[in-house]
Amino acid sequence: MISGRMAALALASLGTMAAGSAVQASQGSASITITGQVPLVCRVAVDNSASAMLSANGNKSELREFCNNGAGYRVVATYSKQLAAGRLIVDGRTIALDGSGEVVISDVSHAAATTRSIAIEADGKAAGSIRFRIEPR
């Protein structure tokens, strides 16, 4: 009869031999597959002078967009009815605020990080609100 210690040694040596033969069998080639998931992150923010931008015509602010979605994103501005008939100026391009309450600021077909210059011309009106949201595709 084999003692417990001898049985343990025998099993250990069998395990070593089995591991040794597995290594020898795979020495010709090896492959490693690494996969992962990157979370979808999309953000839009207006710098701290946004309140000044709305209180006086002609003041400029910056709109910062970031989205890592490979299919792209769009940025939409939602504005109050007090700003209807005004204009939003984005990087020198004038976008009419036609009273619908919503306008697309940018439509990008790839992941990007961008800063845009923005301003509002509200026909002399000194009140109103505007919000920006980013929508991944």
Image: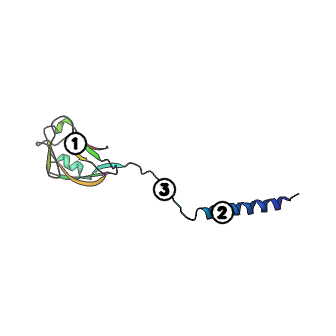
Say what amino acid the circle numbered 1 marks. Val
> Any magenta on residue 30?
no
Which callout, 3 or 2, points to the residue nearer the camera? Answer: 2
Q: Label 3 belongs to which residue?
A: 34
> Residue at point 78% right, 61% down?
10
Please state which of the two labelled residues, at mark 2 or mark 1, is closer to the viewer: 2
Determine crowd level at label 1: few under 14, some 14-19, many 20+ residues with C-alpha closer than 10 A.
Answer: some
Judging from the image, what secondary structure is the residue with disc 2 in?
helix
Per the image, label 1 sits on a secondary structure element best described as strand
Q: Which mark is residue 21?
A: 2
Q: Please, which residue is most extreme toward the right here?
A: 1
Who is closer to the viewer here, 86 or 127?
86
Q: Magenta-highlighted stretch: main secondary structure?
A: loop
Q: Position of residue 136 (x, y in %)?
A: 32, 44
Q: Amino acid at mark 2?
A: Ser
Q: Identify the image quadrant of the C terminus.
A: top left
Q: Amino acid at mark 3?
A: Ile
Place of residue 17 in the rendered image (x, y in percent of width and height, measured from the top left): 70, 63
**Image-quadrant location for residue 14:** bottom right
User: Where is residue 67 drawn, in percent x and y?
Assistant: 32, 50
Of pointers 1 and 3, the one earlier in the residue sequence: 3
Q: Which residue is mark 1?
A: 104
Q: Magenta segment, which residues?
A: 66-71
Q: Earlier in the sequence, mark 2 or mark 1?
A: 2
In the rendered image, the vertical position of residue 40 relative to residue 24, given as above or below = above
